[in-house]
Amino acid sequence: MYLCKDFTGAYLAAEREEGVSDDLPQILYLLTETLDALYSQVRLFPAEWAVHPSASTASIGGAGALTIQISLSPSRFALLRSAISLAGDIELILRALLGLNLGRIREAIQAMKVQADRFRGIRNYFAHINERLLDPAGRHGVSGTHISPCGVSYTEVVSGGMHLVVSGNCVYYTEENELKEVDVSRESFIALLHSARQLYETCVGHQRWLGTKDFPDFSSFYEFRETLFKPRVERSATGKLTWNWRA
């Protein structure tokens, strides 16, 4: 179930009298639309993106060593990229909101920002992929001995080594002479969606709503059950068996 769009009404009507920003209704609307868009993608996630580590375990040395391994079908890669991009958009919207007078929902927005921040690094990585590819020897790569959980290891002579690997439910990459990884599982994105609970409950619990409108419990939104994601085996037009992870 997607988030209802009118839950902020009473709160905003009251808080405007307290001086909250006039832009708040429109930005909150954009936030809920983006949350719902992310949920539409997360519902289609596989249980695991890459079943086995896909990167070579060989040691890498030299200057500007580059390893890119994304063992996903085009549709799955598009799904993953869409979710990462939307999560990054949510972080930017929350950042904009924190620059406004939010009244009593500031704490709720801050809590959401903590969850969204987990995806900020990988979103920026893809958004500025040209900088990473053209200048791995700069601040985007690593130098010296490093061993990544995805199987890529660098020797002491490496300079500007860079990798981008999808393995299991993580994306592994390099940035600022560090090995980075981000959890891109269903559960990880669902945690971001569920972080909207405090915002929702603060708004619908406002005294101006009491006795005038019934809102569903937040638990009915962004539902996450394993039964939603049980795969079906389907046969393509060419006779190939494929897994369909759609709910």
Image: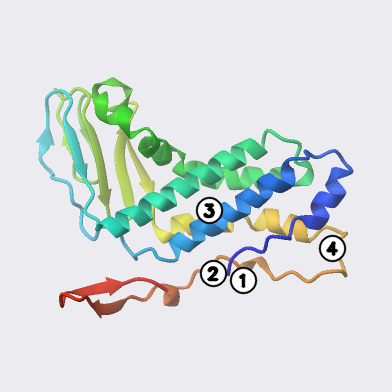
Q: Which residue is mark 4?
A: 209
Quadrant holding the C terminus: bottom left
Q: Are marks 4 and 3 in contact (CB under 8 Å)?
A: no
Above or below — where is 148 with respect to 45? Answer: above
For mark 2, does the 10 Å Cα neighbourhood hold few (<14), some (14 to 19), or many (20 or more) residues? some
> Which quadrant would residue 64 be assigned to in this image?
top left
Residue 228 percent coordinates (x, y): 44, 74
Q: Are marks 4 and 2 in contact (CB under 8 Å)?
A: no
Name which residue type carries label 1: Ser
Secondary structure at badge 4 equals loop
Quadrant holding the N terminus: bottom right
Label whose residue precedes the other's in the sequence (3 or 1): 3
Q: Which residue is mark 2?
A: 223
- Gap between marks 3 and 2, in whole Å? 13 Å
- Gap between marks 3 and 1, in whole Å? 16 Å
Q: Which residue is mark 1?
A: 220
- Gap between marks 4 and 2, in whole Å? 25 Å
Which residue is at the front of the view, 127 or 98? 127
Q: Which residue is mark 3?
A: 192
Q: How many marks?
A: 4
Q: Are marks 1 and 2 in contact (CB under 8 Å)?
A: yes
Residue positioned 61% across, 71% down in the render: 220
Name which residue type carries label 2: Glu
> Which quadrant would residue 173 be assigned to in this image?
top left
Nearer mark to the viewer, of 4 and 3: 4
- Gap between marks 4 and 3, in whole Å? 26 Å
Secondary structure at badge 3 equals helix
